[in-house]
């Protein structure tokens, strides 16, 4: 999973305009920073190679579904990053030693949502990426 995550993250950050983090950006006082960036949330995935009849192994075939949250101060920033994620990831195969990964599928996972609990509000939009990682 670490190799697949590293590959996906490096594909996104290959574009200098794309910043990827694993937690919301805050200043030293804990206030949310008003920036445009991505949050990449990898999941453990679903190992599905006869697990019901045999023990799971570290090299099991896995179906991954990871959430990408786009954060921005305006809708232009949201649309720009959504487009970049689609262009950088759609159809690409993550590279991981000893694994054969399927092409990445990028799906919308909701509308642009404002967070009115902060002033001025930040905007969020979630995407899902999915792919299989099989034994090579």
Image: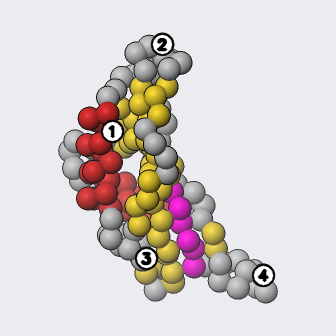
Magenta span dominant secondary structure: strand
Badge 3 element: strand
* Gap in angstroms between the C-alphas marked 3 and 2: 42 Å
**Of the image marks 3 and 2, the number of the one nearer the N terminus:** 2
**Residue to which mark 2 is pinned:** 29
Q: Which residues are magenta?
A: 61-66
* Gap in angstroms between the C-alphas marked 3 and 1: 28 Å
**Mark 1 nearby-residue class (10 Å; few <14, some 14–19, many ≥20):** many
Q: Position of residue 61 (x, y in %)?
A: 57, 79
Q: Position of residue 131 (x, y in %)?
A: 47, 70
Badge 2 element: loop
* Gap in angstroms between the C-alphas marked 3 and 4: 23 Å
Question: Decide: marks 3, 4 in contact (CB < 8 A)?
Answer: no
**Residue to which mark 3 is pinned:** 101
Which residue appears at 32% of the width and 53% of the height?
A: 85
**Of the image marks 2 and 1, the number of the one nearer the N terminus:** 2
**Residue to which mark 1 is pinned:** 78
Question: Decide: marks 2, 1 in contact (CB < 8 A)?
Answer: no
Which residue appears at 26% of the width and 59% of the height?
A: 87
Which residue appears at 44% of the width and 53% of the height?
A: 108
């Amino acid at each position: 999973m670490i190799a697949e995550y590293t590959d996906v993250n490096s594909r996104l950050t290959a574009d200098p305009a794309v910043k990827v983090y694993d937690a919301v950006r805050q200043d030293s006082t804990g206030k949310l920073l008003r920036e445009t960036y991505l949050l990449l949330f990898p999941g453990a995935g679903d190992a599905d190679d006869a697990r019901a009849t045999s023990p799971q192994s570290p090299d099991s075939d896995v179906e991954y579904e990871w959430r990408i949250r786009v954060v921005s101060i305006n809708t232009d920033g949201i649309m720009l990053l959504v487009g970049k994620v689609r262009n950088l990831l759609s159809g690409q195969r993550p590279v991981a030693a000893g694994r054969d990964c399927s092409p990445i599928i990028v799906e919308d996972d909701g509308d642009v949502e404002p967070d009115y609990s902060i002033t001025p509000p930040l905007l969020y939009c979630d995407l899902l990426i999915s792919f299989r990682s099989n034994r090579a």
